[in-house]
Structures are given as C-alpha cells and as structure tokens.
Amino acid sequence: MVGYVFKRYELKYILDSAQYAAIKAEIEKRLSPDEFGRNTVQSLYYDTPDNRLIRASIEKPAFKEKLRVRCYNLNDDDKNVYVEMKRKYDGVVYKRRIACKEGEVAALLNREAQPDGGRQTNGEKQTDGNAEIASGTQADKPQAGDGTQTSQIGKELDYFTRFYGNLTPKILILCEREAFCDKESDLRVTFDENIRYRADDLNFYSSLDGENLLPDDCVLMELKSGSAFPLWLCRILGEQNIRKQSFSKYGSAYEREILKSKLRSNIICLNRFSATATSPQSVSLSS
C-alpha cells in the first residue's frame, strides 16, 4: 500500500451556467488540464451508527473530520481505491490517504473500538519525521510516502477507527469532475457537475446512478492551494460576483435522507390516523 498526505486551503463556490462559462474560459487560458482528464469521482462516506461524524461536521466546529473511500470511474477492473481521512482545522484541510484495492478496505477498517474512547487529536501535525505534511507544487497530486510514512498513516487510521468504533458505509457521492492545475504552483481548480448520491447499493462497481443534490444548471467549483490564490483569479471572481459558499456533499445528502425519513414517518402517522378515524369503532351512532 502507498500512503499520501496533503495540506491546503479549499474554497467552494456554486456557479450558475453563465458564471461557469466565464470562469472556465479564463481558467483554460491560464491553467493546464489535469493529466487524467474528466472523471467520474465516487466517494463512499463511513460513519458511526448514530452518524456522529456528519452530525458534528454540520455544526461547523473549528475542527472536524471525515472518513471516506474514493474511486475514480466505475471500478470494473479492480483498480486502486483510496481510503482517506479528511480533517479541517481553522480553515486548513489535512488529508491522509492510503491506496489499496476495494476488496482490502474492509480489512483496513475492521478495528475494535478503544475501551476508554480514546482522545482526539486535531490532525494538524505528523509526529513522525518521515511523514511530514506535503505542500509541494502538485497539491492534489498525492506525494507518495516511503514505508515509514505509510506506516504512520496506517497508525492514524488505526487510531481513528478504534476511537469511533463501528464505522460502516452510509452515503455514496458521485459527480463528474474536470480539473485544472498550475504547473508553476500548487494551485488546483476543479469543476464538479451532476453531483448525486445514493444511500443503498454502496459499492464502486454496480452503477453510477444517484439522486441529484444540485439543480442541473449548477456547478460546484473548488479552489485548492497551500498558499495564497493569484490576483487574476480573485479578479475574475469579483467580476462575476462569485462568492465563497459552504457546501458539503455528504452533509447535503445526509440532510436529504433525514428529511425523507421524517416525511415517511408523517405519512405513516397520517395513514394510521385516517384508518382509525374511518373505522366502524370510531363512528358514534345516535339512538
């Protein structure tokens, strides 16, 4: 297995079709397309039985963390997937990533809960000298680690799973992603279209179907960099009146599922009430 680490700022913007066309035209002039081109990105999020991770994230604390497994395109040939611990502290994103096969994920995450509950760390530092956080010129292109670094990331994953206990797959997020990068800096820009999810059939190989999370004419743009963003990019954002927004794909899908559950419960209650109100026992006949 190969381990990777990231450290960067990530800003999100929801664009309408006109804004998307304008900023993409400027991006294509200044940045290079990602070497992998346009991909379907699948992200399978894991959580506790009471959804502790996403419930905490929705409250927007200073520190939050998530566990997911990511796959690019349909996994019909047993290619690598990536187990990722994603943490955000004080606006900075820290990511630990281990590459493995889809069939190996269960073994990686099959940990017993730590009896005393453990003690959380904020994820902002690596304690191993050979596992320093990478902030090089390819921010979203993982920096491969040696065996020591992979071992360190494995220890963090082991601690994570022991701390939270029984982690199971909850939501699969899918989208079509087109990425651009700056060859002279760590700037990376991604455009996610057709963002969708499903809460069943949680694997990477059966289909790419899902329920839409955003309107058809909306695109999610993410700006990613370990340092300041260039002035030309800030200028085009201002010209197009594009403002930073908070949008969590997993959070939005979770809230959608909660709403569905409440609606189903209300329908069941209404049906029961209706059946009771119209039953012969409920009708009073005057003599």
Image (cartoon, rainbow, N blue to C red):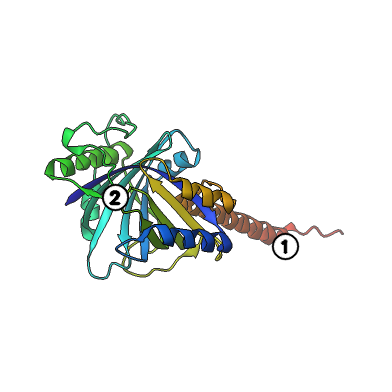
**Mark 2 Cα-neighbour bin, 10 Å: few <14, some 14–19, many ≥20:** many
Q: Is residue 33 above or below residue 117?
A: below
Q: Is residue 126 left or right of residue 40?
A: left
Q: Quadrant of the C terminus?
A: bottom right
**Mark 1 Cα-neighbour bin, 10 Å: few <14, some 14–19, many ≥20:** few
Mark on residue 278?
1
Question: What is the secondary structure assignment of the residue under circle 1?
Answer: loop
Which of the 4 quarters of the picture holds residue 34?
bottom left
> Which residue is identified by label 2?
138
Mark on residue 85?
none
Q: Is residue 98 left or right of residue 216?
A: left
Which of the 4 quarters of the picture holds residue 226?
top left
**What's under tag 1, amino acid-wise?**
Thr
Q: Is residue 279 visible?
A: yes
Q: Return the disc, 2 or 1, that comes first in the chain's sequence.
A: 2
Q: Position of residue 106 (x, y in %)?
A: 24, 53
Could you give the CA–CA distance between mark 2 and mark 1, rounded to whole angstroms? Answer: 68 Å
**What's under tag 2, amino acid-wise?**
Gln
Q: Position of residue 216 (x, y in %)?
A: 55, 66
Q: Is residue 193 left or right of residue 87?
A: right
Of 59 and 16, the residue lying toward us = 16
Q: Position of residue 77 (x, y in %)?
A: 23, 70
The residue shown at (42%, 33%) is 90
Q: Residue furthest left?
A: 147
Of 268 and 140, the residue lying toward us = 140
Q: Position of residue 161 (x, y in %)?
A: 28, 41
Which of the 4 quarters of the picture holds residue 203?
bottom left
The residue shown at (48%, 54%) is 253
Numbered disc in front, either 2 or 1: 2
